[in-house]
Amino acid sequence: MSEQETGQGTVAQRLAGKRIAITGSTGFLGTALVERLIRSVPDCDLVLLVRPGKRSTPTERARREIFRNDAFGRHLENLGKEEFWASIERRVQVIAGDVGTDGLGLDEDGRAILASCDIVVHSAATVSFDAPIDGAVEVNLLGPTRIAETLQGLGVAPHLVAVSTCYVAGNRRGNAPEQLLTDSPFHIDVGWRDEVTAARRVRDDFDAESRTVHRLEEFRSRARHELGAAGTPLLAAKTEQIRHRWVSEQLVEAGRARAASLGWPDSYAYTKALGERALVESKGSIPVSIVRPSIIESAWAEPHPGWIKGFRMAEPIIISYARGLLKEFPGVPEGVVDVIPVDLVVAAIVKVAARGPLGDGTNTDITQVASGTRNPLHYRRLVELVSSWFAEHPLYDQKGQPIAVPEWSFPGRGAVERQLDRAQKNLALADRTLKLLPLRGKQAMINAGVEEKKELVERASGYVKIYGAYAECEALYGVACLLDLESEIQGDAADRFDCDPGVVDWDHYVQQIHLPTVVDHARVKTTGERSDPDARIRRLRSRVLAPERQLAAFDLENTIIASNVVFSYAWLASRNLNPRDRVRFTLKTLGEAPALLALDQRDRTDFLRHFYRRYEGASVEEMNRLGPELLADHILTKAFPAALRRVREHRRLGHRTVLITGALNIVVDPLGPLFDDVICAEMSVRDGRYTGELLAVPPTGEVRAQALRDYADAHGFDLAETVAYADSSSDLPLLEAAGFPVAINPETRLASIAIKRGWLIEYWSKAGGGTDKMLPLGALPSPRKSRK
Amino acid sequence: MSKKKRPNPRPGFILEVDRQTPPILFHHGEGFRMEKLPVGRSRVIYPSEPLRGMDDPDAAIRRALLEPINDDPLPSLLRPDMKLTIAFDDISLPLPPMARPDVRQRILETVLDMVAEAGVDDVHIIAALALHRRMTEPELRHAVGDRVYEAFAPHGMLYNHDAEDPEGMVILGKTRHDEDVQMSKRAAESDLVIYVNINLVSMDGGWKSTATGLAGYQGVRVHHNVKTMRNSTSFMDQEKSELHTANWRQGEVIKNHGPRIFQIETTVNTNVFGHEGPLSMLQKREWEWSVRDRAAFTAMNAGLGRMTGPQKRKIFHSWKAPYELTSVQAGEVEAVHEKTTEMVYKQHLVPVVGQTDIVTMGLPYLSPYNVNSIMNPILVTVQGLGYFFNLYRGKPVVREGGVCIMSHPTPWEFHPVHHPSYIDFFEQVLADTTDPIEIERKYEKQFAEDEWYRHLYRTSHAYHGVHPFYMWYWAAHAMQYLGQVIIVGGEPSAVRRLGFRPASTLQDALEMAEDTVGPRPTITHLHNPPILMADVS
C-alpha cells in the first residue's frame, strides 16, 4: 500500500477499494467494527477469520453470531432483507482461522485470501479477566505475533492494526501516555518467551498435582458430598469434572499472581502487555498500529444508542448491586472510572486504518481510546447516577416488592473482601451441616436456598477480586494521538466517525442509555407484577404428562411409598409373632438400625444383599398368602396417593409405566397391577423356601439406569421421551438417563441438583389421618385370640 | 336397670328454645359441642326413646322362619341336593356395629341349624356388599360369629361378594324401563337365596337387599345417579323415592327370572349409647341429665381434649351399640318389607309442623362407610346432606333456599386402604368442579373402570372406584335444594374444597346464614343420633 492510494478525503473515500481482514469479529468490539464498515464504508471488502465452532462451520458461525445480531438491524432495514444478504455475500469472505495456533490454522485458500488483504485488524482476544493463564498467553500474548509471522511468511506487508488495552500500563497512578511499554520509565524487563514457556509448564505442573493421591481423594470426597451415594460411574464423572475445574482454578490463580507480581491488575492486562512487546519485536517489515481502548461499554450512538453484545464487565456488578446482593464495592470516590463507549473505539480503529501507519511504518504507533483525561467520569458520580436511577426504576423480588439499593461507603478493597469471606465461610458451614441432616421434601429446600445464597456471595466476591483493581486504578491515559486522529481524518455526513471522548454526556449515557440496556439484557424483574409461582410447576408438569412421552419409570421407596426394605421386612417378620416376641423383635431391629443405616449409605447393593439374608428359609407360599394383607396393612397406608394417581395418569395417556426398585419381589408383587412392568430384586427359591440369596445384582444406583436403558431398548422406547421419578441422589443415574427427570420429596442433595437443573419437583405426602409407628408390625395372628 | 323396670319409651319431642333451655348437645366428629340456640326462634327435634326389645330374640327368629309371611316355612324349602346361598348385610349396618351377638349371627345360626337338618351340603354365605369394601376377617367374625366363620370360611364357603369378578356376575334381564338387573352368579344360579337383613333406616331392605347388595356397577348405576337422587324426595320416604321405585322394578325381574328369594328382615331399636354406661347421657335430653351424667360428660370431654385424632378415633370405633331386636319377619320380600317399614317408622318418625329457615345438625364420628375407618370430608358431606337431610317424610325440615349448618371437624384426612378413590375424587375431581351433573358426566366412567381401583376393591379392602361419586350424588338433592351449606369447626381448606363455607363457631355460622335467609331466621336442630325421621307437615 502506498501513501498515494490511502490518499486524502473522508474515511469512506480513503478505505474505498480496500480489502480488510478482521480477527475476533464474533466478539463485542469485532461485531461492532464489521457492522460499521459494512454500513458506513460501502466500497470496502471484508475477510473474517473465524474459528470453527464445535458443531458449526465458520460461515455458519459468522451468519449466526455476527450478521444476525441486532447491530445490523438498522442496515437491514435500510437495504431490505434480500439486498442485505446479497451485499454480505458480495463483500464478506469468511475463512477458517484460529489465532491460538501457529500459522493461524489457515488452509491454502485461506492463506491466499489473507495475502490479498490491504489491512488486518486484530481484535481477537481472551477478554475474560480471570482466564487460565495458559489460554490467555496463547491468545493474547502470542496471537499478534502469530499474525505478523504468518504475513511475513506470505511475503506481504499490509497495515496491521492490533487492538490492545490501556491497562497494559499496569497498576499505577498518574499519567500514562501513548507510548510503547519499553519507552515507559516503569518498564520491567521480562522476557516474553520465558513467560510463554512458564505458562505452558504451569499447566503441566498443576495437572500433575491434581493426579496425586491426596488431591484425588479430596476430589472424590467433594463429589460424594455433592452427589451422595449416586453410584460409581456418576461419582467418577463428577470427580473428573472437579479435577478439571481445580486445575483451571489454579491456572487462573497463577495468572493473577504472576500479573500482580509484575504490577498488572490481572492476567488479561499482563498477557496483552507482553503481547504488544512480542509484536513489536517480531513485526519485521510489517507496519503496525496499536489501538488501546480502556473499559469498553455499550454504544453512545452507533449502530444505536445502548447497543451491547454479551454480558460484560460492569453489567454483572450493576445488576448485583440493583438486586441488593453487592452491599459494598471497593473504590476511590474521587478516582476515575475509565469507560469508553464501543462506537468510539470502533471509530478510532477505522480511522487508524484509514489513515495508515504513521511515518514510514517502521515505528509502531499507538492510539489510546480512553475518557479519563479528556472527559472524566468520577467513581462517586457513577455510583450516584446508578443509585438514583435504580431508586426510580427498582428491580423487584420474587414477592413483587421493589428492592432498595444499598448505599456504598467506598471502603477499601480489603474490608469488602473480608466481609464477603466471612459470609462465604458461614454459608459453607451451613451448607455442610444441612447436607448431613436427613432432610426431605420441603425442609430440604432450606438447604437449596442456602446453596443459592452461597453461590451469590461467591459471585459477588469474585467480582470484587477481579474488578476491584480497576475501580481503584488511578492511572490517567493520555489521548493526544486520538485527538489528532479526530481532527485529521474526517467522516462524512452519513457517519462522522466521532472518536473524541468529549462528545459523551456521562449523565445521559449512564441513565438514559447504559442502565436501561443493562437491565433489559439481564432479564430481571422490572415490574411489581407477581409472577404466578405455580405457573412454572404447571408448565413442567404438563410437559411430563404430554401425550407424546413414551415411558415413565418410578422408584419405589419414598417415591411411591414412605417405606423401606427394613419396614417391609419388619411387617412380614412380625406377622406371625406373639406379643412378647414382637417386643423383643422390635428392640432387636431398632438396635441394629444405626449399623444398617451406615451400611446403606456406603453401598446400597451390599446393604440389600446383607439385609435380604434375613428372608432365608421363609416359605414362598406363606409370603404369597401375606401379599394382599401386606398391600392393605402396610403398603397402602404408607403410599403417597398422588404417586398412585400419577402412575395411572401416565397409563391413561398411553405411556408405558415401569417400577424399578431394589426392593424384593415379595414386597413389590402386590403393587404389580399398578404398573405395566416391574423390575425388582428377586430371591432364589429352593424347596418352596427362599434362600436369602439374590438371583442378580439388585437394581440400585447405576444398575437401575442400565435397567431403564435396557428396558427402553427392548421395547423400542426413546429415553429422551422418558419420565423418571425418584427421591434421592443415589437415583441420579436413573434420573439423568431419562429426558424428563422428576424429583419427589427430594433429600437435600437431590433438591439442590434438581433446582439447579430446573427439574420438576413434586411434594407428595401420605393420606392424612394415619399413625406413624417406629416400626410397622403385622397384625396379630388370630383375631379371636387377640379379642380374648 | 333391667328393661322390665324401665318406664314406657316416650315418643319424639319438639322443644321450643326459651330462656330456660340449657346448651344443646351437638355431635362433632370424635367430640361434642354444647351450643346455645337463639331464644324464641329455635326448636330442637328429639328422637323417640328406644322401643322395647323382644324378650327372646332367638325364639322370635325361629318363629319367623317357621311361620313366614306369604311363603312356606323355611325347612320345607330345603332339600339335600339343592344349591343354597345365604347373603347378609355388610359392615355398613347397623351403625355403630352392635354388641355381640350380632343379629346376623343369631339368624345365621338358626338358619344353618335348619340347613344342616335338611342335609344341604352346597351352601355359600356371602357378605352382600355390592360396591362397598370387603370386610376383614375380624369384621366377618363379628357379624356371623366365630362358630359360623370357622365352619365355612376356611373352606371358601363364606366370603365377600366380588362385583368385579369377570366370571362371577350375570345379567338377569332388563326392567320395563330397559334397565339392567345384575346379580352374583352364585346367587343367581342357586335354588334358593336366603337374605339376612338389618333394617336400620327406611331406605334399607326389601328388593334393595338383593337388587343392589348382590349387584355390581352395571346394576347399581341404574339408580345410583344424580337424576334418581334428585327425584327422590326423600330417598328415606318409599312413597316418594325414585331410588326405591327403581329397586322395586329390578325386584320384578328377580322375581320373574332370578332365584327364589327368602327374605329375613329385622329391625332394632335406637338404643345406640345404652341406658346406662359411659355414653348413656348422649341419648337423654339435656335438661334431664343427672349430676352423674354431667360429671361423666365433662370428664369425657376433658379426656378427649388430651387425645390425638387417631387415639380418639380408636376409642369411638371400639364402641359397640347395645341394640335390641324389635322385630323379625321372614318370607316373601315385599310383604316382609311392609312390616319392617312399619316398625322402622314407629321407632323413627317424629311429627313436625312447618319448615324453618335454617337446619342445624351435629355430625357424629360415624357414617355407613367409615366403620373402623376415617370419616373423610366426602363422608361428612354424605352424612349431613345425604342421610341427615333426607331423614324426612313430606317435606324437608328446612325451607327451599334455606341454610344447612353442620358441625364436624372435617379434617383433610382419608383412610388410604378403604378410600383410595375418595382421595383422588377429593383432590382431582372436586378441585375441578362440585356440580354433581358435571362430575357424573366427566369423571364417573374413568373412576368406575380404573384397573387399580378394581384391583384394590377385589384384593384389598377398598371401596369401589365409583363409590365417592355415589356419595356426591346422595347429597345432590340437598345441594340443589339448599341456599347455602356451612360447616362449623371444619378445616377451612377441606370445607372450601367441598364447595361449602367454614365457620369457627355456631354464632358465626348463624350470622353468615343471614346473608342467605335474611335477619332473625328460624332454626331447627336435629338431635340425631339416635336416629330420628322428621314427619313434616
Image: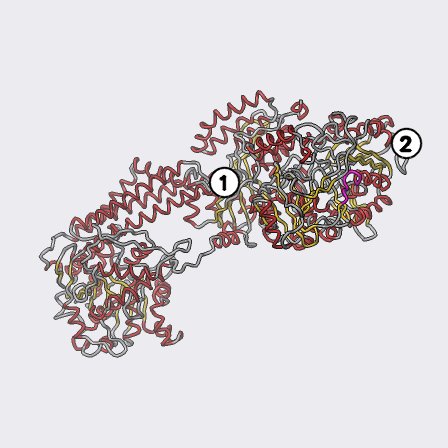
For image coordinates 39% across by 58% down, the residue present is: A525
Frontmost residue, B512 versus B104: B512
Q: Give the range drawn in magenta.
A: B345-351
A64 left or right of B326 in image: left
Q: Where is residue B60 in the image (x, y as percent from the top left)?
A: 84, 29
Q: Where is residue B487 in the image (x, y as percent from the top left)?
A: 61, 46
Q: Residue most toward the left?
A: A185
Frontmost residue, B468 versus A720: B468
Q: CB atoms at circles 2 and 1 under 8 Å apart?
A: no
Q: Is residue B248 visible?
A: yes
Please, what secondary structure does the residue beneath circle 2 have? helix
Looking at the image, is A27 positioned above or below residue A618?
below
Mark 2 surroundings: few (<14), some (14-19) or many (≥20) residues within 10 A: few
Please, what secondary structure does the residue beneath circle 1 have? helix
Under mark 2, the amino acid is: Ser
Under mark 1, the amino acid is: Arg
Mark 1 surroundings: few (<14), some (14-19) or many (≥20) residues within 10 A: many
Q: Where is residue A705 in the image (x, y as percent from the top left)?
A: 48, 42
Kindly report the distance in space between the C-alpha atoms of the residues bearing marks 2 and 1. 67 Å
Looking at the image, is A97 positioned above or below residue B153?
below
Residue that numbered label 2 is attached to: B76
The subunit carrying tag 1 is A
Frontmost residue, A703 versus B110: B110
Residue that numbered label 1 is attached to: A704
- Residue A658 in magenta stretch: no
Q: Residue most toward the front?
A: B19
